[in-house]
Amino acid sequence: MTAELIIDARNATGESPVWQPDENALYWVDIPAGRLHRWQLDGQTSAWQADEMLACIVRSPQGHWLGAQESGIFRLTPQADGRLHAEKCASVEHARDKMRFNDGRCDRQGRFWAGTMQTNMGADPVGALYRYDPQAAGAPQPLHAQLQGLTVPNGMAFSPDGKTLYLSDSHPSVQLIWAFDYDIDSGTPHNRRVFVDMNQHPGRPDGATVDAEGCYWICAIDAGLVLRFTPEGRLDRTLELPVKKPTMCAFGGPGLDTLFVTSIRPQGIDLSDQPLAGGVFALNPGVRGLAEPLARA
């Protein structure tokens, strides 16, 4: 299967692709640049600049975005002048300095989950997983960690019925994907177990999604692959990309049958073997995905 380059974005760290059906558009972020990008089916592109690094985004019913940045969760509104207006909804107290949010998404009920990591990819397990619970209007509320002891939380996805939460840790010292039973009423994960040991597969586990058949797709960063695992944790499909560091995949397109993949453009190395690094790609894997839930806020 050939991966089609849809935009040579040259993102330092492209992440968090989200399909927006009412615009026929794909949105994603470049984390260190603090930039929100949009690509439309007609080929038009746009970008908006935030004041902090921007790690992941989810859409709200009101039409704005919620984004996890360095210092918390923000309500984000693109402006005509290219700025991304940000209003803080919830603050975070990191375990130490120089940390930021990383991967995140909504559960099937619209709760926004996001994990934190050290900006320098340090090996200390000081990252945490947070659930954003919208509060009444007023001062930003502090976030409370729901799961601690993570290094680089990633690969978050929910099964079609919402009753299984998947989560990975991308750090080279971990490289595991876990599954949790998920209480859809309380928004609480429990019964954590290893779903896939990525030390037994090429690449490290990065961003992920789930298709309509309940299979789990995850980017194998450093290996230039996207891997599909059945709900039993069996590898049943491998897709190749023309870059070494794919970061996250998401289903989109009018039929939710296109798999979009963001990537990293490494700095300070020879890219002659991967000149399209940092681009956004599209593949047709032969299965459909699921629409991303809107955030409760």
Image (spheres, grey):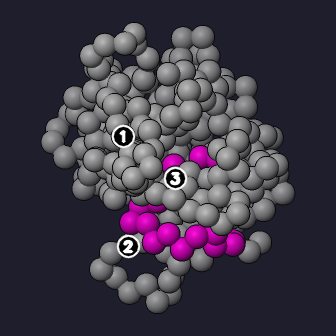
The residue under the point 61% across, 16% down is 184
Residue 210 appears in the picture as rendered: yes
Pick whichever, 243 or 167, lies toward us: 243
Quick check: 285 left or right of 47?
right
Assign a secondary structure to mark 1: strand
The residue pinned by badge 3 equals 28
Q: Which residues are magenta?
A: 3-19
- Determine the image quadrant of residue 284: bottom right
The location of residue 227, given as percent across then percent down, is: 65, 58
- Tell which circle, 3 or 1, labels the residue nearer the N-terminal end: 3
Q: Is residue 1 magenta?
A: no
Q: Which three-letter amino acid code belongs to the residue tagged 2? A: Pro
The residue under the point 32% across, 24% down is 90
- Above or below, 253 relative to 181: below
Pick whichever, 228 or 130, lies toward us: 130
What whole-number distance in Å separates the C-alpha atoms at marks 3 and 1?
A: 16 Å
Assign a secondary structure to mark 2: loop
The residue pinned by badge 2 equals 266
Q: Nearer the viewer, mark 1 or mark 2?
A: 1
Q: Residue furthest left?
A: 97
Q: Which three-letter amino acid code belongs to the residue tagged 1? A: His
The location of residue 35, given as percent across then percent down, is: 39, 54
